[in-house]
Image (cartoon, rainbow, N blue to C red):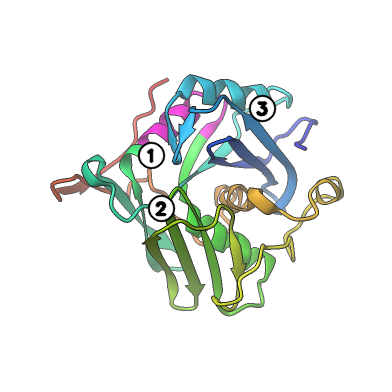
Amino acid sequence: MFPRRRQTDTAIGIELRTDAAYLAFVRIDDHTVVGLGRATYQPGTVVGGAVRRSAAVVEAIDGLLDQVRWPTPPAVAVVAPPVEDAGGDGTVSAPIIDQGPAGTATASARHVDLAVDAIGRTRTATTTVDALPVAAARFAAEAEPSLPVVFARGGGDGAVWLATAGPLGIEIDLDHEDGLDAVITGPDPSRLTPPAWGCVNVVSKVRRAYPHPGRYVPAVGAAFAATGRGPRVNLAGPQAIRRSGQGVEHRWGVEVVR
């Protein structure tokens, strides 16, 4: 389910998963979830969060977006999965900002490059590359704003991550093991459960179709980032730093090939 009327103030969060691109549409003025969409593509298009066939990603996402009349390209935040060691591919890191520095997020530079290139070819305006653990923690904080500390745990493809968000900032830990394929959150790391919508504003049609956010949690969290809501991180922004396999660091930006 996604918005079918003319949209002028909508931000989009996108997570590229193995089976499909998961999209969340959030109204910018009141941070309300107005639509969720799933753009499917052929197996092998995205493997382990890395785009293998950018043309297939573009075709799938544009096919979904073409059902909405966009007066201008919508602002988009695309989610990048976290990594602990990208080997020769190198990594890219960026500060997490929440009324000041609140931690650091890291992802594979190759994953970020490929995602930005693919999404940049769609009929959108890519503004942010979000970090998946930060997106999940951002969603959890929106759903349960009364919690002083939020834990968000997820995994897949042999790696498990745990994000801790509280008054002192956000920390992200990674373990290499078979783990979850969905996000679980809560105030106690030993008792995490699938997140509910909670205090997140959701239009009634979306809430009826999706009583629980499920696999759309990262996409919704990323869409909130595109609206300026919650902790911010941009792995393709001017504050991002790339580290090569040889350990050389330098400032890094993204040039999208159109």
Mark 2, residue position: 82
- For the residue pair 91 and 31, the one nearer the viewer reads as 91
Write down the region rendered in magenta.
Answer: 112-125
Specify whether 88 is left or right of 63.
left
Q: Considering the image in quadrants, where does the N terminus appear?
A: top right
**Position in image of residue 62 (x %, y %):** 61, 23
Based on the displayed image, in which of its 4 quarters is residue 100 positioned? bottom left
* Residue lying at 25% horizontally and 40% vertically, measured from the top left: 89
**Position in image of residue 111 (x %, y %):** 38, 39
Specify whether 16 is left or right of 244.
right
Q: List the single residue furthest toward the front.
A: 178
Instruction: For marks 3 and 1, give the CA distance.
Output: 23 Å
Q: Is residue 223 visible?
A: yes
Mark 1, residue position: 111
In the rendered image, the vertical position of residue 28 relative to residue 16, given as above or below: below
**Position in image of residue 68 (x %, y %):** 73, 27
Based on the displayed image, in which of its 4 quarters is residue 233 positioned? bottom left
Q: Please tell me the numbered disc located at residue 24.
A: none
Q: Is residue 71 visible?
A: no
**Position in image of residue 104 (x %, y %):** 36, 61
Quick one: SS at disc 2?
Answer: loop
Instruction: For marks 3 and 2, give the CA distance.
Output: 27 Å
Is residue 116 magenta-colored? yes
Prevailing SS of the magenta stretch? helix
Quick one: SS at disc 1?
Answer: helix
- For the residue pair 200 and 174, the one nearer the viewer reads as 174
Q: Residues within 10 Å of mark 2 (few under 14, many from 20)?
A: many
In the rendered image, the vertical position of residue 100 relative to residue 239, given as above or below: below
Q: Earlier in the sequence, mark 3 or mark 1?
A: 3
In the rendered image, the vertical position of residue 63 relative to residue 88, given as above or below: above
Mark 3, residue position: 65
Specify whether 68 is left or right of 151.
right
